[in-house]
Image: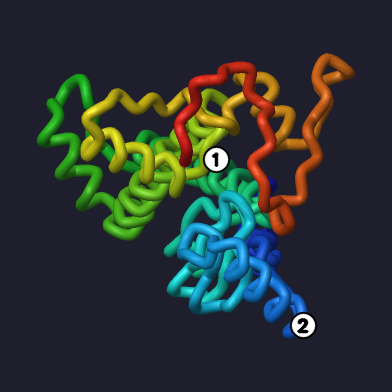
Amino acid sequence: MFSMMGLLYYFYKTWNTDPGYIKTSEEERKENIIALAEAGCLDFRTFCTSCLVRKPLRSVHCHACQACVARYDQHSLWTGQCIGIGNHYYYLLFLFFLMMTGVWLLYGTLQYWSNHCAGSFHQDGVWTYFTQTMSCSPWVSYISSVACFHTLWASGWLSVQLYQIAFLGLTSHERMNLLVQRKSSKHAVSLRRTPYNLGCFQNLADFFQCNCFGMFKPNIIDWTKQYKLFHLAKEKNVHSV
């Protein structure tokens, strides 16, 4: 019940929370267009032609939502919502509780089969035990297959997300862009040499906005209004994202 409540709550928070839409007034849009045009920077990297807004760093225009999202990670098909600076934290917790709910469901189905089905894995073999458990209760078997599917993808995607956050300091969209650059570029492109990778513990402190009992000081950045690349990384040879 705890896992189910957490799953439903963080699904709602992920779906209902503003992911970080870039919002500007009509006057600000006109001023940004004039300023970018005079500076010769009116291109797709700094200006969104769909929203007519100046694009902050790490923001991407989502064609599904028809809006620019700050520190854009992806458009999640499971929640029907963009994942950005505003709800990325809730999205990770949604994946965690989805994984935990699936694990408990799998544990429950195994307990049901062991108590109510006559088959034995060690005596009957794999195939006979499988067919007996399927015929013993088709509904429980269906629940088990659905739970297995969601547990596998949720645990796998949660691991990928945590790896990108902790060891790369990148979003899913930024990582995919670097992978494309790696294939097309003649020079070596490292996923670790970016301005946003400040080390494992600092990356985690920045993402979760925690100081880890005073050991780290998280960088507080408003990605909806960050337009200039600040140099936080110690490495000078970094790749653009």
Is residue 173 left or right of 162 when viewed as pictured? left
Is residue 65 left or right of 226 when viewed as pictured? left
Which residue is depicted at the point 83% across and 15% down?
A: 215
Q: Mark 2 points at which residue?
A: 27
Whether residue 96 can be seen here? yes
Q: Is mark 1 on a helix, strand or loop?
A: helix
- Examine the image and state in which quarter residue 236 appears: top right
The front one of 224 and 64 is 224
Which residue is depicted at the point 59% across and 33% down?
A: 196
Mark number, residue 152: none
Which residue is depicted at the point 58% across and 27% down?
A: 197
Q: Name the residue under label 1.
A: 100
Amino acid under label 1? Met
Q: What element carries label 2?
A: helix
Which residue is depicted at the point 22% across and 49% down?
A: 134
Amino acid under label 2? Glu
